[in-house]
Image: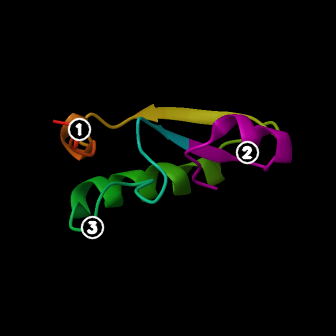
Amino acid sequence: MITVSPEVSAQMRPPRALYPNGCKIGNSLGKPGMRALQKTGLREALSLLTVDTRPGSIVTRDFPEYGEYHEPPDLRN
């Protein structure tokens, strides 16, 4: 499982889950066209299949490539 809401996902106790820290709902592995980041995130998630994990545990990974660039602009100006 790839989740952007680790607190909620932990309650479901999935056998394994990846939390891409900083990613937003709808862009859990980056925005469209960010193929390198998406590929890295997917490989990270698949690598969890080779690790004996405890149900409900969430593995957190940072993806600095996602960055602040993807925050919506402030429209209140």
16 in magenta: yes
Q: 48 or 77: nearer the eye?
A: 77
Image x and y of residue 38, in percent: 34, 59
- Residue that carries the numbered disc 1 in the rendered image: 76
Quarter holding residue 76: top left
Of marks 1 and 3, the one in the foreground: 1
Q: Residue at x 41, y 35 (%)?
A: 22
Q: Secondary structure at mark 2?
A: helix
- Residue that carries the numbered disc 2 in the rendered image: 9
Q: Residue at x 57, y 53 (%)?
A: 2
In the figure, is residue 47 to the left or right of 9? left
Q: Outermost residue toward the bottom?
A: 33
Q: Quadrant of the C terminus?
A: top left
Q: 58 or 71: nearer the eye?
A: 71
Identify whether 47 is placed above or below 66.
Answer: below
Colour scheme shown: rainbow
- Residue that carries the numbered disc 3 in the rendered image: 32
**Quick one: label 2 or label 1, which is nearer the N terminus?**
2
Instruction: Tell me which amino acid carries mark 2.
Output: Ser
Residue 76 in view (yes/no): yes
Q: How many numbered marks, from 0 up?
A: 3
Q: Outermost residue toward the front?
A: 77
Mark pair 1, 3: CA separation: 26 Å
Q: Residue at x 55, y 40 (%)?
A: 19
Mark pair 2, 1: CA separation: 33 Å
Identify whether 69 is placed above or below 49.
Answer: above
Q: Residue at x 34, y 52 (%)?
A: 40
Stretch of the chain drawn in magenta: 1-18
Instruction: Tell me which amino acid carries mark 3.
Output: Pro
Residue 21 — which label?
none
